[in-house]
């Protein structure tokens, strides 16, 4: 009986090795490391089916600056405050026939096409070569590729998630650094146990679109898709996709990564967007450290008849430390040149937080505070535009449950 249980537990580990994940975290939502839970599988272990769930409930307080407007036009400094359900994910993962792993998840807190959070299968040809097809995370940014339920702070860095500012009122031209979930195909693998790679083609339309609607580029005469690649160096083996887990207080891993992508005729066929990112992450016992820098170039398609192009720069440094096996302190400094490098001034956004992991019941409590400061702008208009739509003071308390 004991041998059978061990065999089923080992079978739970997905076969595909992505550069940023180890097998136990392959669904990208919750870590299944060391947990058998409720599982359906064959005696031989050639088919295993494992359901999982993640629910996050949060309370928010956001205070916004007047942005130079008269009080008659901007009465409410406090907005977008109250309660939310950021994620309510129900999914299943597993493996079949010793070669194929699969995952499907629904986020009931989303709407439209984003209801389908993930839907993919992965075919392993050899340890150094696997093929993934479906809807999954694009290969860009350590922060986005972290297991959803194991992030250091409940909010992504503003420099990743916030749309840039463009001085043109074109339809839907509001790209952000992060590319997130998308539909596509990807080759990935692990070479020599320490060199990871991911090379893929995606629609480039994001998580809310589940249909094929792209064309050929009028300018470059290539498919108007998102071309993406990520390469990582992990000298001590695969870096776990976690920013804090009380079950991983004895890890010693680090990662250095470089990623790049080209989104052809993105943003309603108006722009061609290039992104480049550099990332470093380190997990040493109770300590977690990470730093990223990313750059984006936006050039307009010829049909827009706009000669301008824009460059944006952002990044963050963050760290967490387990003061006890259940309490984790967190700090982050985030910066973003949201108006573009052609204008003076940038956002600098310090944040602090604390996490508590309840023992034996998969509950996690997170709290954070963030301040959005503006520095070095040449004009008041540039200063106001830079944090347009962003809260100057924000606080979040989030309670999470998963199995």
Image (cartoon, helix red, strand yellow):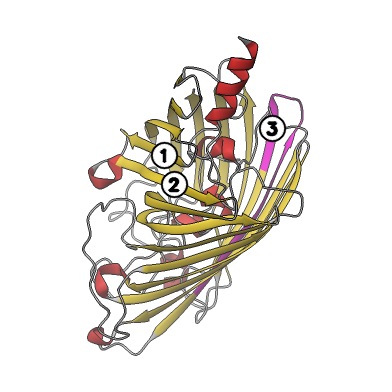
Q: Which residues are magenta?
A: 312-330
Task: Farthest residue to the top: give it.
Answer: 1
What separation in Å lies between label 1 and label 3 (alpha carbons)? Answer: 32 Å
Residue 212, given in percent of the width and then of the height, sits at 23, 60
Residue matched to label 3: 328
Q: In this orientation, does residue 173 appear?
A: yes
Residue matched to label 1: 102
Residue matched to label 2: 122
Q: Do the numbered discs 1 and 2 sit on residues whose CB atoms are within 8 Å?
A: yes
What separation in Å lies between label 3 and label 2 (alpha carbons)? Answer: 34 Å
The magenta stretch spans residue 325 = yes
153 with respect to 298 (left or right): right
Q: Do the numbered discs 3 and 2 sit on residues whose CB atoms are within 8 Å?
A: no
Labelled disc at residue 64: none
Residue 118, given in percent of the width and then of the height, sits at 37, 43
What separation in Å lies between label 1 and label 2 (alpha carbons)? Answer: 6 Å
Magenta span main SS: strand
Categorize mark 1 by other alpha carbons within 10 Å: few (<14), some (14-19), many (20+): many
């Amino acid at each position: 009986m004991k041998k059978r249980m061990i065999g089923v537990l080992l079978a739970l580990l997905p076969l595909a090795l992505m550069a940023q994940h180890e097998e136990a975290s392959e669904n990208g939502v919750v870590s299944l490391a060391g947990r058998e839970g409720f599982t359906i599988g064959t005696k031989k272990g050639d088919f295993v089916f494992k359901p999982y769930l993640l629910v996050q409930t949060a309370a928010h307080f956001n205070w916004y600056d007047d942005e130079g407007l008269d009080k008659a036009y901007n009465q409410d400094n406090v907005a977008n405050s109250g309660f939310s359900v950021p994620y309510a994910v129900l999914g299943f993962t597993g493996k079949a026939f010793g070669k194929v792993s699969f995952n499907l998840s629904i986020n009931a807190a989303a709407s439209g096409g984003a209801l389908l959070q993930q839907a993919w299968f992965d075919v392993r040809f050899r340890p150094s070569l696997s093929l993934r097809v479906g809807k999954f995370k694009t290969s860009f940014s350590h922060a986005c590729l972290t297991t959803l339920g194991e992030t250091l702070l409940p909010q992504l860095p503003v420099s990743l998630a916030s749309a840039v500012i463009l001085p043109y009122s074109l339809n839907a031209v509001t790209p952000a650094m992060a590319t997130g979930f998308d539909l596509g195909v990807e080759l990935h693998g692990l070479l020599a146990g320490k060199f990871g790679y991911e090379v893929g083609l995606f629609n480039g339309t994001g998580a809310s679109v589940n249909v094929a609607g792209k064309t050929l580029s009028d300018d470059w005469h290539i498919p108007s898709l998102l071309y993406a690649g990520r390469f990582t160096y992990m000298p001590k083996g695969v870096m776990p996709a976690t920013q804090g887990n009380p079950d991983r207080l004895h890890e010693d891993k680090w990662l250095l990564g470089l990623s790049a992508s080209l989104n052809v005729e993105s943003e309603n066929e108006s722009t061609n967007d290039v992104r480049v990112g550099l990332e470093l992450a380190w997990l040493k016992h109770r300590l977690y450290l990470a730093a990223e820098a990313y750059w984006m170039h936006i050039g307009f398609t010829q049909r827009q008849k706009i000669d301008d192009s824009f460059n944006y720069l952002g990044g963050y440094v963050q760290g967490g430390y387990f003061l006890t096996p259940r309490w984790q302190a967190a700090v982050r400094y985030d910066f973003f040149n949201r108006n573009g490098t052609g204008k003076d001034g940038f956002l600098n956004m310090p944040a602090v937080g604390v996490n508590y992991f309840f023992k034996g019941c998969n509950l996690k409590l997170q709290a954070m505070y963030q301040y959005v400061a503006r520095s070095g702008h040449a004009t008041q208009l540039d200063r106001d535009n830079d944090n347009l739509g962003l809260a100057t003071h924000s606080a979040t308390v989030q309670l999470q449950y998963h199995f």
